[in-house]
Amino acid sequence: MKNRISTKISSISPSLTLAISAKAKAMKEAGENVVSFGVGEPDFNTPGHIIDAAKTALDQGKTKYTPSSGLLPLRKAICEKFKTDNNLDYEPSQIIVSNGAKHSIFNACYAILEDGDEVIIPAPYWLTYPEVVKVCGGVPKYIEGKKENKFKFTAKDLENAITSKTKMLIFNSPSNPTGAVYTEDEVREIAKVCEEHEIFVLSDEIYEKLCYNGVKPFSIASVSEKMKDLTITVNGVSKTYAMTGWRIGYLAAPKDVAKAIDSFQSHATSNACSIAQYATMEALNSPKAEVDAMVHTFDLRRKMLLKFISEIDGVSAVEPDGAFYVMMVVGDLYGKKYQGKTITDSVSFADVLLESKKVATVPGISFGAPDCIRLSYALGEDDIRDGLARIKSFVEELE
């Protein structure tokens, strides 16, 4: 009998993030008091004026198909966003609106990669990157970001990893899972290497607005016209405007790449949800103070989380400058036992912690960081205090 499932799909690893979240949710529904640090979405509601824009669109009957690449007024608004925020000039034909930034990332990889092309992925990385690369026929090749450099890789690291098969670099700043934000100088040095070797960059900038300590991200496509012609920039509204469930992401690309992606998307999914597109137009016009207030709240939680971690013997954290995650280093605890159960790696650490203390985290091994676990601070301050107190108790009880 022939294989029922394709080799490409069989090669995919399930998302540990979603698996942990599902397990924690099931425990909560069963009445257990679970604190989850696993979520990758803001705990705020979508702002009311954005919801109202969607209601108005519904009332006006704007429930029909749109162009596969997205509503023209929305693509024009996205062009304006790139000009204002990133000093990048694009035409609406270079913008593709998709069903979330993850969909945009898949589209970009599918349009660029041939079977056997190598894609450089800096570790720690968002766990979806290598899986998308594999599905699209590419071969992930990892370079390691150093803890002493806030988990960031260098231009030299990139240079050393490039081979004749290298087609693309996936660049994520601010980063999930580390919160690392690359400086303008660092981005320019990385861009020099990409230009010299003429490799594409898929720049995932979904956490662009979520930065702290006065740090500002810098779009690699803005380095030069040559770099812009090698870059597919991905962004969206899920993190900045608390719109994860609305499923709107977008990308900006060179004209030939955008045309290819539009053609593919027209057959694969057609357009993104029309109502969500109208809501996104409103989101892009949100008052700056509204976003700043959310970022301020995240920053307070970030500082709280770092302070609590510093008070737990045996673990440490690398301070993030962006996103809403902290990587907690737990490798020194491997080999210890909790009530007879040995902690051998980040997976067993997360499993035993969830079972014993009802705290959900994400194992770092799924991000290419085997000695860490990822903690999200997209949850309330009371839950952060409670959850970290449970983690401290768990660590203190290890033998």
Image (tube, rainbow, N blue to C red):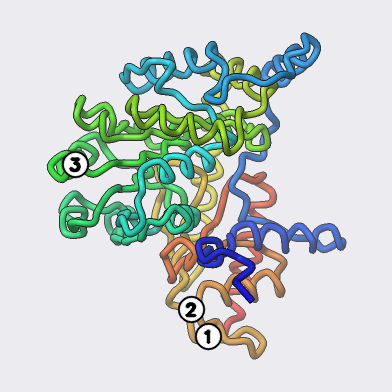
| Drawn side of residue 176 relative to residue 38, left or right | left
Q: Name the foreground residue: 375 vs 6.
A: 6
Left/right placement of residue 61 relative to residue 40 reads: right
> Between tags 3 and 2, which lies in front?
3
In the rendered picture of this protein, how many numbered marks are placed on residues? 3
Measured in 3D between alpha carbons, the distance from the residue under mark 3 to the one under mark 2, in whole angstroms, is 43 Å
Classify mark 3: helix, strand or loop.
Answer: loop
Could you tell which of marks 3 and 1 lies nearer the N-terminus?
Answer: 3
Give the foreground label among 3 and 1: 3
Q: Is residue 296 visible?
A: no
Instruction: Identify residue type, mark 1.
Output: Lys
x and y percentages locating residue 158 in the rendered image: 21, 53
* Amino acid of disc 3: Glu
Q: Please state, as top left, top right, bottom left or bottom right, where the N terminus lies in the image.
A: bottom right
Q: Position of residue 147 (x, y in %)?
A: 32, 60
| Residue 333 numbered mark, or none | 2
378 up-or-down from 269: above or below: below
Which label sits on residue 184?
none
Q: Residues within 10 Å of mark 2 (few under 14, many from 20)?
A: many
Residue 389 can be seen, yes or no: yes
Task: Give the CA separation, mark 3 to mark 1.
Answer: 48 Å
Q: In the visual, does 184 lie left or right of 151?
A: left
- Mark 2: which amino acid? Leu
Q: Residue at x 62, y 32 (%)?
A: 242
Extreme residue in the right direction: 31
Residue extending furthest toward the top: 60
Provide the residue designation for mark 3: 198
Disc 1 target residue: 336
